[in-house]
């Protein structure tokens, strides 16, 4: 039985117990959420030593960081370094999105390097393999693709990103609609390229049952990727994007019926006024499946600072109901991120996730901020540093400002608003 | 006649014409907005060479950066450097919040250094002067305070921040309510300290007509500061904050009746789920007066990254109706910002302001993002760099990734989704 089937049958597994403790919720809450498909549990039994992570309704918002080998300048060691930076910054999950080089080696080292759940996008490797084996990625066969999918699942990848809903019908719609930026999903664009060249329907859609068999066999979570992800604010919520989401909603039901856990990937670029609609639409069409959003970016123009743009979009999305934030780094739109940019991207996403959690009523998040506020009132600097989202950075910045530990707030220089008030409030008490 | 009276009398002044051009709206739109009090025009006729800036309903969201001498480690030259960094980063306005040292010299150099509107918080200087003249800031007299206010107005300060609504009644309420962080407004806390020590009502409230006379005489904009600004999420929208806002609403009407332009300062720390309520409440109680929010921060725990927390809060606030964002730097809660942190704070606020403007339907903002999206589709890198919110940073980051100009997107390494799609879409067209 798969985890989803266990949950439906009232069985609480060890993984469910583990995540219940991590989340501070009851095991039954986790079981019910998984049974309904509103929570997915990332943590394949084939991934050695993985610490499972739950994503979904009623739980804290999670963050994922993507790395991967893109060209000859990248190395496995360099990407593992980035994984370590992302973990240090507090990421909940990772994606290995390698598209070339030693893809197998990279995946194996990533799986061995961390106990965090790891996702992949198998199409990338299938395309790269076809290029090598058959001279062109356009010559990839359907079997090639499914063999790679099965290999990733068997090796213990915890979630598989697959563009299952990007059908020919939708590609035609995107073309008719005259999008500003027609296709910005990297995998989606390659898949569509393959489809058009081979005059074939999307193999992941046509052979969806074959995919479900693999997902069932290895009990791996499917992450439906959005080939029609809007690449600019102007294209947000257009017919192509929404049509694909309708199809993904159907596939969610088919996956659940097969006992397979599923989440849905989302945009991208969304103006602030369309974020709530985007999330609520996904929740409705995809029957409450967890929503894994990429940012979203709330402006097209924050080049060099897209982690901030994504933090705005991520916070609003998570407050509206998205449960999983794919980070965006400052290097988005200019290049691949270096280690520091990976770190900064994770921190920005974590701020967004945490701010949304406080607003959504996640008890642990509220308690955290309350403790920080009390430490601030008490001028307890050590506690403030400890409770900071990134204690190391906070401490370094604080040290730069103050030579040694001081009970005086450095913000106001020689004046201290807190002290004066506290003194006067006490005085008032004494004379009252 | 003051600018507000001119607007009411149907007169379009040169300043109104200037800001109408800058905003891309009609002169009549500006005049009507000022007449209703929904737009304030920052730009004192006593501030030589100032380029007026309009803030309010229907206009692009503006950003302000604060600098100032706080202790002996600060210098006028150092603070002017920060002003230059803020301007380089694109701030719309500045505040000189000096609390010690050569406050007069700092203000004069700031006024001379830039054509941007500048605000001050005169109470700081009145307190510092009293300490020097009378041995303690608690010995400040009401005349001391008003003399400083008039000096700032006469010298050409464009907007004066004053805690006019922080009455004894409200201080008592804050105490009864048991706030987590009772008072975090620096000026507010000092004013309340003075009030309690001298057993006197708030002199700015008691002598509000005297304040209006000065504001009228120099036609300076009043910025009502919030002494009850919540200092943590848990204190947001409590009785003390809302009671003060009720009083500020009354004072808005009195100021308008006296022909004085006014805006209202706001929080601070606000959980995401309370931002819209906070803004709508201000709009209602303060009869549409522009709302100048400080952040707001959406978590208490993003120490070292509060500019990101503030960008989230600022974007949501501006989308909900706030028109003016006071920046927050990464150094907030640990110390005074250095030049780089001033720069980063302004950029983060500008991203928030711009993202909100796109969502609010500000035509120039929408057009900007559309052009960027078109440049991206056309792989026009030069144009993308030029259209970035901070072209210099974008260009530097881009150059680090690519050795020379290239039509190939560096994001995807040797694959290029855009090219493949474009090629296939053209092919489809040819065979169709």
Image (cartoon, coloured by chain):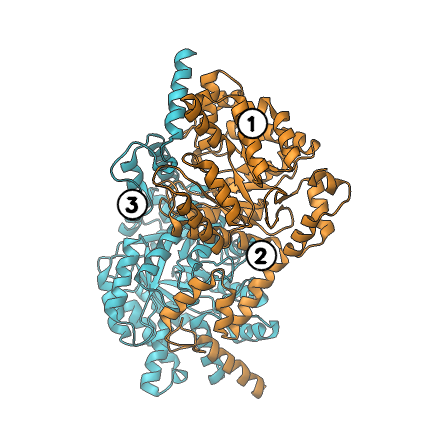
Chain colours: A cyan, B orange
Task: Report helix, strand or loop for mark 2.
Answer: helix
Chain of the residue under label 3:
A
Front tag of 1 and 2? 1
Residue B137 rendering spot, x and y as whole percentages: 43, 24
Residue B242 rendering spot, x and y as whole percentages: 55, 30
Q: Which residue is mark 2?
A: B358
Which residue sits at x=26%, y=73%? Answer: A104
In three-dimensional space, the C-alpha distance between marks 1 and 3, rounded to whole angstroms, equals: 38 Å
In three-dimensional space, the C-alpha distance between marks 2 and 3, rounded to whole angstroms, equals: 38 Å
Crowd band around label 1 with a 10 angstrom C-alpha radius: few (<14), some (14–19), many (20+): many
Name the disc covering residue B146, or none. 1
Task: Report helix, strand or loop for mark 1.
Answer: helix
Crowd band around label 2 with a 10 angstrom C-alpha radius: few (<14), some (14–19), many (20+): many
Crowd band around label 3 with a 10 angstrom C-alpha radius: few (<14), some (14–19), many (20+): few
Which picture quadrant has residue B300? top left
Q: Which residue is mark 3?
A: A400
**Disc 1 + disc 2, Cβ < 8 Å:** no
Which part of the image, by quadrant, shows the C terminus of chain B? bottom right
Residue positioned most to the right:
B10
Front tag of 1 and 3? 1
Q: Which is nearer the N-term, disc 1 or disc 2? A: 1
**Disc 2 + disc 3, Cβ < 8 Å:** no
Labels 1 and 3 share a subunit: no
Chain of the residue under label 2:
B
């Amino acid at each position: 039985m798969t985890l989803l089937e266990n949950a439906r049958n009232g069985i609480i597994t060890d993984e469910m117990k583990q995540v219940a403790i991590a989340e501070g919720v009851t095991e039954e809450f986790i079981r019910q959420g998984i049974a309904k498909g509103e929570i997915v549990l990332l943590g394949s039994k084939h991934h050695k030593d993985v610490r499972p992570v739950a994503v979904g309704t009623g739980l804290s918002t999670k963050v994922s960081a993507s790395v991967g080998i893109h060209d000859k300048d990248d190395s496995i060691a360099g990407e593992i370094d980035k994984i370590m930076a992302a973990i240090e910054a507090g990421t909940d999950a990772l994606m290995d999105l390698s598209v070339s080089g030693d893809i197998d080696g990279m995946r194996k080292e990533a799986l061995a390097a961390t106990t965090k759940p790891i996702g992949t996008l198998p199409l990338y490797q299938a395309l790269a393999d076809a290029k090598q084996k058959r001279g062109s990625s356009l010559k990839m066969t359907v079997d090639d693709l499914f063999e790679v999918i099965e290999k990733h699942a068997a090796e213990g990848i915890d979630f598989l990103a697959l563009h299952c809903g990007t059908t020919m019908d939708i590609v035609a719609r995107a073309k008719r609609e005259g999008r500003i930026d027609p296709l910005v999903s990297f995998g989606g664009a390659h898949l569509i390229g393959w489809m058009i060249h081979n005059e074939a329907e999307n193999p992941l859609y046509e052979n969806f049952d074959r995919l479900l068999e693999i997902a069932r066999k290895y009990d791996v979570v499917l992450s439906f990727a959005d080939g029609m992800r809007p690449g600019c604010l102007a294209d947000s919520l257009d017919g192509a994007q929404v049509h694909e989401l309708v199809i993904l909603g159907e596939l969610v039901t088919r996956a659940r019926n097969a006992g397979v856990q599923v989440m849905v990937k989302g945009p991208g670029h969304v103006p602030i006024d369309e974020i709530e609609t985007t999330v609520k639409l996904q929740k409705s069409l995809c029957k409450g499946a967890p929503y894994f959003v990429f940012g979203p970016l709330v402006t097209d123009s924050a080049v060099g600072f897209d982690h901030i743009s994504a933090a705005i979009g991520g916070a609003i999305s998570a407050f509206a109901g998205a449960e999983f934030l794919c980070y965006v780094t400052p290097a988005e739109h200019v290049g691949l991120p270096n280690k520091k940019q990976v770190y900064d991207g994770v921190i920005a996403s974590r701020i967004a996730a945490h701010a949304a959690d406080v607003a959504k009523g996640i008890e642990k998040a509220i308690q955290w901020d309350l403790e920080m506020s009390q430490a601030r009132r008490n001028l307890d600097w050590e506690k403030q540093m400890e409770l900071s989202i990134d204690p190391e950075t906070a401490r370094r910045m604080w040290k730069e400002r103050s030579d040694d530990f001081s009970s005086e707030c450095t913000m106001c220089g020689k004046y201290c608003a807190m002290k004066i008030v506290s003194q006067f409030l006490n005085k008032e008490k004494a004379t009252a």
